[in-house]
Image: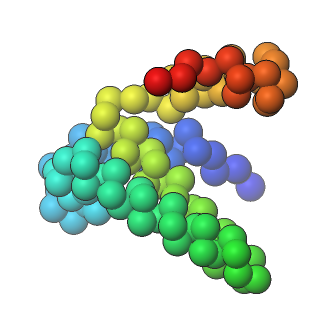
Amino acid sequence: MSRFTIHDLATIIDARAASGGEASYTRKLLNKGSEQCAKKFGEEAVETVIAGIGNDRDHLIAESADLLFHLLVLLKSRGVKLEEVEATLAQRTTMSGLEEKASRKRD
């Protein structure tokens, strides 16, 4: 059995974004613009938090899947590649979490 990865999902989102089909939820989200994609991601984040507070493991898994999907759609809407996020994560893992957080630029 092959393992489905977040890269597989990103590839599917890229393909659906490139299609002109009105049957694609991904395409419909992207057509609404980055702001709407961000709002939808935020809604999914709240739903994931609520599921995390609850005691239903399957609900948390389902909401987490929704969250990851909508994150990738948001990134796509802003022209950010998953590999760019991964590079930032890789860079951050070269030090402890506390050191990394302290080193971030403050506004």
Q: Residue furthest front?
A: 107
Is residue 34 shown left or right of residue 21? right
- Residue 72 location in percent, x, y? 44, 45
In the displayed structure, 40 sits above or below 97; it is below
Answer above or below: position of 83 versus 34. Answer: above
Residue depicted at x 63% and y 75% = 51
Res 57 quadrant in image: bottom right
* Residue ranking furthest to the right: 96
Task: Tell me where residue 1 appears, x and y as whole percent.
Answer: 74, 55
In this rendering, is residue 97 above or below 45?
above
**Point 29% across, 40% down: residue:** 77
Residue 62 in view here: no
Image side of residue 88 versus residue 38, left or right:
right
32 sits left or right of 38 in the view = left
- Residue at the (56%, 39%) spot, across then down: 7
Q: Residue at coordinates 19% horizontally, 47% vertically from top-left? A: 33
Q: Quadrant of residue 63?
A: bottom right
Q: Position of residue 66 (x, y in %)?
A: 50, 63
